[in-house]
Amino acid sequence: MCPKRESPMKHTTMGRRHIFRSIAATVALSLAISAVAATSTSAAIRPSVATAKTGGEATIAINETFAGFCYSALVAGTALNGMSAIFESLFVKARNGDPIGLLASGATSTPDFKTWTITLRSGISYTNGQAFNTDSVIENLNYLRGAKYVPPATNLWTLGAAVAGFANVVSITKIDDLSFTVSLFKSQNDFPISIAGIGMRATAQLATATSCSATPIGTGPFTMSSWSSTELVVVKNPNYWRRDPARPSLQLPLLDKITFIVVAESSQRAAAVRKKSVDMAFFTGRTDNTYIADLEQRKSVVNVYKSPNLFYPSLYLNQSNGGPFSDLNARLAVVNCVDRANFNKVRLKGRGETPTSVLGSLNIGYSKTGFTPFNPTKSKQYVSAYLAAHAGVTSLSFTVPFESATQVQNNAKFLQKTFAECGITMNILTEEQAVWAGKAYNVVTGKQPYDALYTAGLTDVVAVGNFAIFATNQFPTDSPNPLKAFFRNTLGPLYNLNRHTDTSIDDLLWQGRAATTKAASQAAYRAATQKIQEQGIMTSVANFGWSIVTNKKSKLSAPGSIAIVKGQATQPVSPSWTDWAGISKG
């Protein structure tokens, strides 16, 4: 039998249907330059758009608070989802992880993936009337990547964690009003998806610290009416650019008003959507499975829409803060004492994925090699080795912050009890996410103060977000990026919550980004995962998905009912983005 040839990872050409061979994709993607049209999403979650009505209001229950609208605001999960009704990005993510052009109409690259040309859709404006064009995009990207902070620095209030994510960008050059090039230091075959989900903001919003934080101005289907930390009210943008593909004469959005309210406790969220106090509610499989399971039994009352198990919460073991995890034995003691199967059974009600890797089985970097299964006997041996190497230390103990919500605390107590059985003490520090995230992702000092963190940074089928977590620093030592001098020691390692220093992992990650075939990318990413696991740098607990629940009396259409680009289906259920333009009522 002849060996199967690898298909090349091709760069795209202008003037045609743009094909970018993503490292995470099983098929080539399309960045369509055609008008927005219908897509073939699953009939199980897609009602007939022909019956969709215009007008009406909806109330949505989420679990995260709003902290402001500037790049620097520490906003998480479902609060970002609410903000996505206002802000739009150049690309959004398809179900298979490929980018779909939203504000952008296409992306092409040179063969080495070091220069990307992005083209924009025409005829789009911000809600204050400012034209959306190349100048606006470059302004946004330069703020995001930190280019505005080279002396004389301006608009310091926009400084945020995105600087690390854009560290590979050396320069951005305007071609014309609707196209520009991005020059990278190292090859990056997944660049378009790396900028998916980053909302573009109008110049007037960026003008002052107050306006940047409190006056969101985007291109999206809705504009802000009012907001507080626990509520965001948005109203229809009458000049929105998209139209319903099934009825081209009908301009989106379909709803007149959406109110996002924060309901932290999952039991209260479940009761609210069941009783129609809210029309829709978001639930995370990390903590809410009891209520998701109950709601699924109430088929006459609610609709439940689920995502795959694409979220991989992990214990991040900090090697830099003077705690125990600079010692390999301490790390291996912990990773050998995570009872993932029982955590999934008890805390996730068996609805998650019991991990066999730090990454989920659908991810391009998934590898079982070097992964440590639950083994209390080995864990105790590593505890003894750690104590023997540290005179005067009488216990292996560490502290982890957890939010105050009941189910989060119950998760923490399960882990705490299991660790105690291995002779390990895990102290629970009760802090809300906005508090601990502000400390862990400190954009001023770059310090990570906690011994460990339990959070769901690893995700998806692609490598983009996980790259930043696995790499030691986003600014390579040999980078010509002029921003390196300002940010390498602070923002460069920001996403490396483990603060590990093994640069051989970086080398493998960059190999994955530079590869010209999917197989070569996958091999490099899997090798990086293996090293992470063998060194006990971090470890998984239980993988989960998200659910969106609607009350049937509200008659809301299913998420993802209307396409953005023909033939490209977005992931309909996501904590951080929903196509609110396509949601209708009644």
Image (cartoon, helix red, strand yellow):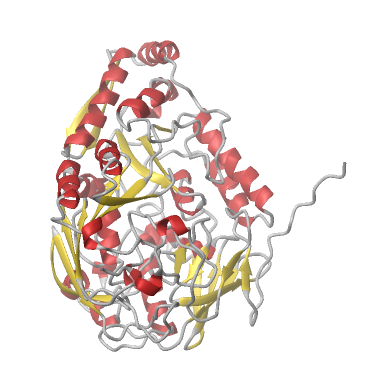
Does residue 573 sit above or below 259 in this rendering?
above
Q: Is residue 193 left or right of residue 66?
A: right
Quarter placement of the N terminus: top right
Q: Residue at x 23, y 26 (%)?
A: 413
Dividing the picture into quarters, in which one does residue 529 lie?
A: top right
Of residues 58 and 14, the one drawn nearer to the viewer in this rendering: 58
Of residues 107 and 496, the one drawn nearer to the viewer in this rendering: 107
Q: Residue at x 39, y 29 (%)?
A: 326
Q: Name the spot of residue 419 as percent of width and height, x first.
A: 31, 19
Does residue 502 sit above or below 304 in this rendering?
above
Q: Residue furthest front?
A: 300
Q: Name the spot of residue 127 as percent of width and height, x first.
A: 27, 83
Q: Residue furthest right?
A: 1
Q: Name the spot of residue 387 as percent of width and height, x first.
A: 35, 13
Does residue 335 sit above or below 77 in this rendering?
above
Q: Residue at x 18, y 55 (%)?
A: 65
Q: Is residue 442 left or right of residue 368?
A: left
Q: Residue at x 19, y 49 (%)?
A: 274
Of residues 235 and 66, the one drawn nearer to the viewer in this rendering: 235
Query: Could you tell me if residue 480 is visible in this image?
Result: no
Query: Could you tell me if residue 260 is visible in this image?
Result: yes
Q: Name the spot of residue 22 as percent of width and height, x first.
A: 59, 59
Quarter placement of the C terminus: bottom left
Q: How many marks?
A: 0
Q: Is residue 512 left or right of residue 409?
A: right
